[in-house]
Image (tube, grey):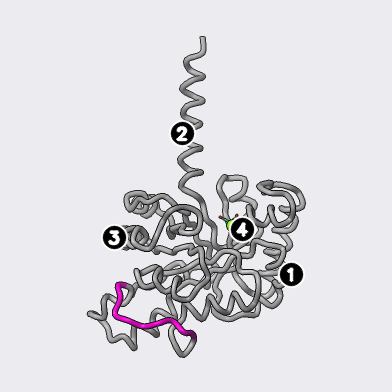
């Protein structure tokens, strides 16, 4: 089991930069690693990725020394287990609105005595071939990054309780769903949405917890860094579309008489 450099970095006060990838492509995962990002966040919430595809992407990440985390759609223990068992070094669960939901995430991720994750000689445990399973469970409990998303007004209303739950490493604000929940769907730069994000990150940091969010352009990145977010996620589609559009604008501009 690998050491989670991202967890070490953010727990010691640093900031980690990753990329969401919801397209099936081990090659893109390798490129994210070669570019120097700190982690890939394979997105199995939005998009078609299933467990088997994720396994190939996790393997590609390991090949370039890149920690691979997976955003998992359903907060069901047996479902989270399958993504962890293929070797994800972290999981991120969307729409975690209540303390009970958040506790269920921690329980699903941690092996006993901390949680209820089922144990077997799976890929994450090197198929039981390198270290005794009892030692592997201790290491897995230490290394797996647990991220829960705060992206609804229901979660906002429970934030104080959510912030007391042990075992969650990052509270990740999802601006898009938060904007929907606030009645401004998709308006992530609406002044009220920006003000809410600022309030939330301040509350998260005030109790010594770590905050994460998306930053798909340089303006959002500068704002997020300024606010003290320590887990920042770019997006493969945003990267591709921005450079493609800029290139085309320039190409078509050059054609003008
Ligand atoms: C959101 O902005 O809603 C997210 O979940 C980030 O992808
Ligand atoms: Mg969301």
Q: Is mark 3 within 8 Å of ligand 1?
A: no
The residue indicated by pointer 1 is 157
Of badges 4 and 3, the one in the foreground is 4
The residue indicated by pointer 2 is 244
Task: Inspect this view and state whether residue 36 appears.
Answer: yes
Give the CA distance from mark 4 to mark 2.
26 Å
At a point 37% along the width and 60% down the height, the residue shown is: 54
Local packing at callout 1 (Cα closer than 10 Å; few below 14, some 14-19, many 20+) is few
At a point 36% along the width and 83% down the height, the residue shown is: 119
Secondary structure beneath dot 1 equals helix
Q: Earlier in the sequence, mark 4 or mark 3?
A: 3
Of the numbered discs in the image, which one, if any, rests on residue 63?
Answer: 3
At a point 44% along the width and 64% down the height, the residue shown is: 69
Magenta region: 115-123
Expressed as whole percent of the image width and height from the top left, the position of residue 250 reads 49, 24
Expressed as whole percent of the image width and height from the top left, the position of residue 181 reads 70, 57
Judge from the rendering whether residue 33 lies leftward or rightward of residue 192; answer left or right. Answer: left
Above or below residue 68? Residue 99 is below
Judge from the rendering whether residue 227 lies leftward or rightward of residue 87; answer left or right. Answer: right
Local packing at callout 4 (Cα closer than 10 Å; few below 14, some 14-19, many 20+) is many
Secondary structure beneath dot 4 equals loop
At a point 40% along the width and 79% down the height, the residue shown is: 140
Of badges 4 and 2, the one in the foreground is 4
């Amino acid at each position: 089991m690998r050491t989670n450099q991202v967890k070490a970095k953010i727990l010691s006060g640093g900031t980690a930069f990753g990329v969401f990838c919801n397209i099936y492509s081990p090659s893109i995962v390798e490129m994210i690693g070669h570019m120097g990002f700190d982690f890939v966040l394979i997105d199995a919430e939005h998009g078609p990725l299933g467990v088997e595809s994720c396994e190939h992407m996790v393997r590609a990440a390991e090949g370039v020394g890149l920690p691979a985390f997976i955003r998992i759609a359903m907060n069901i223990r047996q479902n989270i287990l399958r993504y962890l068992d293929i070797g994800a070094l972290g999981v991120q669960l969307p729409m975690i609105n209540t303390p009970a939901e958040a506790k269920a995430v921690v329980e699903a991720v941690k092996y006993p005595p901390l949680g209820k994750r089922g144990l077997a000689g799976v890929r994450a445990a090197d198929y039981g071939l390198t270290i005794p399973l009892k030692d592997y469970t201790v290491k897995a409990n230490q290394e797996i990054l647990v991220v829960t998303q705060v992206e609804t007004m229901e979660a906002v209303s429970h934030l104080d309780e959510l912030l007391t739950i042990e075992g969650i490493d990052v509270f990740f604000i999802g601006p898009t769903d938060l904007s929907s929940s606030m009645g401004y769907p998709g308006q992530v730069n609406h002044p009220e949405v920006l003000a809410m994000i600022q309030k939330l990150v301040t509350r998260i940091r005030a109790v010594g917890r770590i905050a994460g969010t998306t930053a798909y352009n340089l303006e959002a990145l500068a704002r997020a860094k300024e606010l003290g977010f320590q887990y920042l996620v770019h997006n493969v589609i945003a990267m591709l579309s921005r450079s493609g559009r800029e290139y085309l604008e320039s190409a078509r501009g050059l054609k003008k008489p």
